[in-house]
Amino acid sequence: MDFPAVPAPLDPREQPILERLLRTRDALLLLKQDKSSYIKSRDVLPLYEEVVAEVEKLNAVRKGKDRRMAHNRLDYVLDDCFQLISLLFLTVGRNNEAPAVYSLATTVQRLLDHLEEAGFYSSKDLISITKTLAHMNETLDRCREAYSPALITLLESRLEKCRLLLERLQGGLAKLSPELASTHETLVSILRSTAAVNTRSKFSSSEVNNFRNQLKTIQEKTKDGVFVDADGLPLPGEQVDVKLLLERCWIWTEIVLERQGKVDERFEEQYERLIDIRNQLDRLAVTQAWSLRETDLFGYQRKLDRIDEGRVNGNFVDTEGNPADIHAQRTLLYLIRRSYGYIYSLLISSEPVSEALLPVFNQLQTLRKCLLEVQESGGVSNSRELYPYSMKLNSIDNMRVDGKFYVGSDIPEGQGSVNALLAECYDIVWELRAAVDDEDRTAAAAA
């Protein structure tokens, strides 16, 4: 799990802190791996307290030292502990509390770093992250008094880095006029779609050629290398970035067609590992509601982090230290970025419900979706058609004791979310039944 190049702590006062954190990390990993029972808040909170106590000791040891000094093994183990605690908070349904923010904040920072490094991105990439950052800041403000100042300061520092990165990226897009922004977004999509075709098990030349046809259409909108409007006048805004992106698309599609999805054999092992991670995360994204335990993401995060951190000056290198060619470099980076994107999507779609209540919550989600579809398609012709829905709702309602869902003797987190969803389903059934009754009364009056 530890990156082999990470040095041990130089300050002897940090060594006992490292040893205690290693024991705590082992306990967190055991809790994560135990699938025999549901994880409970009381299992997580003592371990969180242990980590915070060590952070406070570490802050005292490092007081006055340069915060920019290179990370040692202690920093990496501490990051593991916070990542695990964050994912455990999500697993028990405490999504809207400060510790749960950590994992999402680190993932957002990775995504923003990669967007800046890549040099191409669209407004759609930034809209979701902007909302997520705002939500995380709201969570910190709300939880400021409830959690350790050491944790709040750490999270604020992470979010501030993300905010500055986001502002730089937004500034880059602000230079584009609306017409150029639309073309820019299309080019970003073509570049990514080409990379996706490049990593499929069966390479499709026809798809890449279709992208090249789109590039020809865009190229035809230029005059002497300048993008112009319908009257032939140069479009306002920064044209250099769009022209460079267009050129990059031409080069990339040409390289991909030439290589036919075959990566340099020196980097095949890294490629296969990243393909496997990407595919597993893709499957999780499809079956998330029924199969995801948020702590499962820790393993994927760590594998990706270590591959990402293994680059030298931004380049993937072989066993002899030679850098990858442009095809292998871009292919591996695409897979890393795509995988981080999946993790981000899975984290932001995590429901504030304990895994113990997820089976009930998921059933209600499915029931709500079915009822909304019935409502949108014109409702039911008679009340009898609502019996299956009513019976299912009643069977779920009967699971409650004094308005609460129990699992054994425990009252899992997320009661409010499940009860609100149950009430919403009842409301939709009532509206559907009322609509049928109104029609019956209208028909009776007409007769």
Image (cartoon, rainbow, N blue to C red):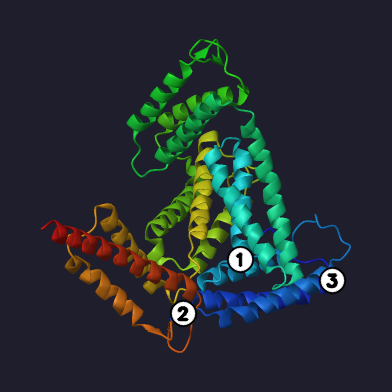
Q: Assign a secondary structure to mark 2.
A: loop
Compared across the picture, whether 125 is left or right of 440 comes to right
- Residue topped by disc 3: 60
Compared across the picture, whether 418 is left or right of 105 comes to left
Of labels 1 and 2, the one closer to you: 2
Q: Nearer the viewer, residue 350 or 389?
A: 389
Which mark is drawn over residue 83? Answer: 1
The amino acid sitting under disc 1 is Gln
Tell me, yes or no, whether the two marked residues, 3 and 1, touch with CB atoms within 8 Å. Answer: no
* Residue 160 visible somewhere in the drawing: yes
Q: Residues within 10 Å of mark 1 (few under 14, many from 20)?
A: many
Residue 213 sits in quarter: top left
Quick one: label 3 or label 1, which is nearer the N terminus? 3
Kindly give the residue lying farthest to the bottom in the view shown. 409
The amino acid sitting under disc 2 is Tyr
The amino acid sitting under disc 3 is Ala
Q: Nearer the viewer, residue 408 or 253?
A: 408
Q: Assign a secondary structure to mark 3.
A: helix
- Location of the C terminus (image quadrant): bottom left
Quick one: label 3 or label 2, which is nearer the N terminus? 2
What is the x, y in percent for residue 339?
A: 50, 51
Image point 43% across, 33% down: which residue? 259
Tell me, yes or no, whether the two marked residues, 3 and 2, touch with CB atoms within 8 Å. Answer: no
What is the x, y in percent for residue 157?
A: 73, 57
- Residue topped by disc 2: 38
